[in-house]
């Protein structure tokens, strides 16, 4: 792979850049594959042979080859997420800069397809993660991936960053994994090289500032901002860090990397804010930049109000509550409400926060959809099958790999079990629902998620 000369020139003199090693690793054809295991879905099962740990994330594992994830039912069950290992450093950054995660409200502003968000939902397991994506089609992918992850502490929104100004100081932690010129992914995706230009870098840097300026009012005083890109360009990395400190009044936070040889600390030229650079010739992962900040003062921005609507989390009637108790055992930590006839389960402690979010934003998913009541019948929702809410009450069918793949292809499908709704499982993990009838089985795997690959 040959890297464009103007691109290599932009890296001359940048800390940690070693031209010969950098070019060699891009031409080597080497690939690095890593997964992050879902700590709530049988984390001790052996998913792949010959793995080695990603040093900075307890759930991260390097694989020694890239399997077909599409043809692995565990992947569809949300047992793991395929993620670049460098990005998993977010876990270590949170550990050092945020620490205790209980009860915190977190915004992942640029979230699709969901790599950082699923990590955040595991780190903040007793917090609330709002996972936002501005582009509608990408928000749909985010809903799919967060549904598979199964957590009920996630809300997916589809808003422009400026809309978050209607929620001043709402979030304790904000992650901005900004859209960027993408040079850090050149090794993995050489086609991205063609789209790179100096103009693109300049455009991205401008957009990064706008996104940050728009969203920062929603960060609480004392809150943490994590800024990340997959670009090597200082204009998108250290210069943005300078701007965050000098113009937005943030306080830089250092992360101790002594345990992680290969990660390079950089210092922003004006503010001296530390940032952390990942080069594929020096660590096992793709190009990445991350920096952390605290917000200790409010920099006066004229706030725009997006839209305020009367949001109510429609309560379940007493009769409905009794019916729901049969399929979702009563639990003090989980609150339920109705949205357009769908029963939703959310963490009880965040009920009022979710109400506030619903009054300001376009909500694509709130907690876990449990199902609908149609007369005396309960129709389970797909998300419920993927969640890690207690599903003991349902009949289950344990599928082997071939059966699981047929189910995931939404093929005609036969299995024996109790009549009625059955949870289809693979390796003990829910994949979805099927309804067993006297002479056939109806496959309820969502049409739009089905596996198309032969
Ligand atoms: N955080 C994601 C993950 O770990 O899977 C990757 C995010 S990707 C680097 C950047 C995201 O920002 C994309 O999903 C893109 O659609 C979104 N984006 C593009 N333009 C944006 C804008 N103007 N404001 C906010 N987000 C934007």
Image (cartoon, rainbow, N blue to C red):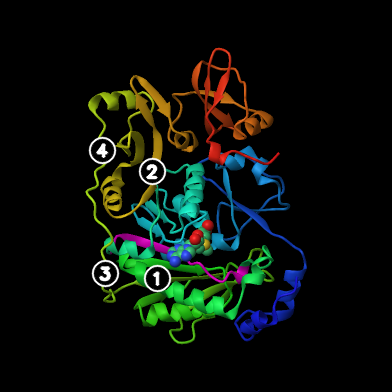
Marks 4, 2: nearer the viewer: 4
Q: Secondary structure at mark 3?
A: loop
* Residue 170 forms part of the magenta stretch: yes
Q: Outermost residue toward the left?
A: 310
Q: Secondary structure at mark 4?
A: loop
Marks 3, 2: nearer the viewer: 3
Q: Which mark is residue 303?
A: 3
Quadrant where the C terminus lies?
A: top right
Marks 1 and 3 in Cβ contact (< 8 Å)? no
Q: Nearer the viewer, residue 235 or 36?
A: 235
Q: Secondary structure at mark 2?
A: loop
Q: CA distance from mark 4 to mark 2?
A: 15 Å
Task: Residue 21 in the image: state x and y as whole percent.
Answer: 73, 76
Q: Residue drawn at (62%, 86%), measured in percent from left and top?
A: 13
Residue 42 appears in the figure: no
Q: CA distance from mark 1 to mark 2?
A: 26 Å
Figure check: 444 above or below 250: above
Q: Which mark is residue 212?
A: 1
Q: Which mark is residue 314?
A: 4
Task: Residue 61 in the image: state x and y as whole percent.
Answer: 63, 53
Marks 1, 3: nearer the viewer: 3
Find disc 2 in the rendering and name its residue. Answer: 367
Binning the other alpha carbons within 10 Å of mark 3 as few (below 14), some (14 to 19) or many (20 upward) gives some
Figure check: 67 above or below 1: above
Which range of residues does the magenta coloring cover? Answer: 169-184
Q: Outermost residue toward the right?
A: 28
Task: Residue 441 in the image: state x and y as whole percent.
Answer: 57, 20
Residue 400 appears in the figure: yes
């Amino acid at each position: 792979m040959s890297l464009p000369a103007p691109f290599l020139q932009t890296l001359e003199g940048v800390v940690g850049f070693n031209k010969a090693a950098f070019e060699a690793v891009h031409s080597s054809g080497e690939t690095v594959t890593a997964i992050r295991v879902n700590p709530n879905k049988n984390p001790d099962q052996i998913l792949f042979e010959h793995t080695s740990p990603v040093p900075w994330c307890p759930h991260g594992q390097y694989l020694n080859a890239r399997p077909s994830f599409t043809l692995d039912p565990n992947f569809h069950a949300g047992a793991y997420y395929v993620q670049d290992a460098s990005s998993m450093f977010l876990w270590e950054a949170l550990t050092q800069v945020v620490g205790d995660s209980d009860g915190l409200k977190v915004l992942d502003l640029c979230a699709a397809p969901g790599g950082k968000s699923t990590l955040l939902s595991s780190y903040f397991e007793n917090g609330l993660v709002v996972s936002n994506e501005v582009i509608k089609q990408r928000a749909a992918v985010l809903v799919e991936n967060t549904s598979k992850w199964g957590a009920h502490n996630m809300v997916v929104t589809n808003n422009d960053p400026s809309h978050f100004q209607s929620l001043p100081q709402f979030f304790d932690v904000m992650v901005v994994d900004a859209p960027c010129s993408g040079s850090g992914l050149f090794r993995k995706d050489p086609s991205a090289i063609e789209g790179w230009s100096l103009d693109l870098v300049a455009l991205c840097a401008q957009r990064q500032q706008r996104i940050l300026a728009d969203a920062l009012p929603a960060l609480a005083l004392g809150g943490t901002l994590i800024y990340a890109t997959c670009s090597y360009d200082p204009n998108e990395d250290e210069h943005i860090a300078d701007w965050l400190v000098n113009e937005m009044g943030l306080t830089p936070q250092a992360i101790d990397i002594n345990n992680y040889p290969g990660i390079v600390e950089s210092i922003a030229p004006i503010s001296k804010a530390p940032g952390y650079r990942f080069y594929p010739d020096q660590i096992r992962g793709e190009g990445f930049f991350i920096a952390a900040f605290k917000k200790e003062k409010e920099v006066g921005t004229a706030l725009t109000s997006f839209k305020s609507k009367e949001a109510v989390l429609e309560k379940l009637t007493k009769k409905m509550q009794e019916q729901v108790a049969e399929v979702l055992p009563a639990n003090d930590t989980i609150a339920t409400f109705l949205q357009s006839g769908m029963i939703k389960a959310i963490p009880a402690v965040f009920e009022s926060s979710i109400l506030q979010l619903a009054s300001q934003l376009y909500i694509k998913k709130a907690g876990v959809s449990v199902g609908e009541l149609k007369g005396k019948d309960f129709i389970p929702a797909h998300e419920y099958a993927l969640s890690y809410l207690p599903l003991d009450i349902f009949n289950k069918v344990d599928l082997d790999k071939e059966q699981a793949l047929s189910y995931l292809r939404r093929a005609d499908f036969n299995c024996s079990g109790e009549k009625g709704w059955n949870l289809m499982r693979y390796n003990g993990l829910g994949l979805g629902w099927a309804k067993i009838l006297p002479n056939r089985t109806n496959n309820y795997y969502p049409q739009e998620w089905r596996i198309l690959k032969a």
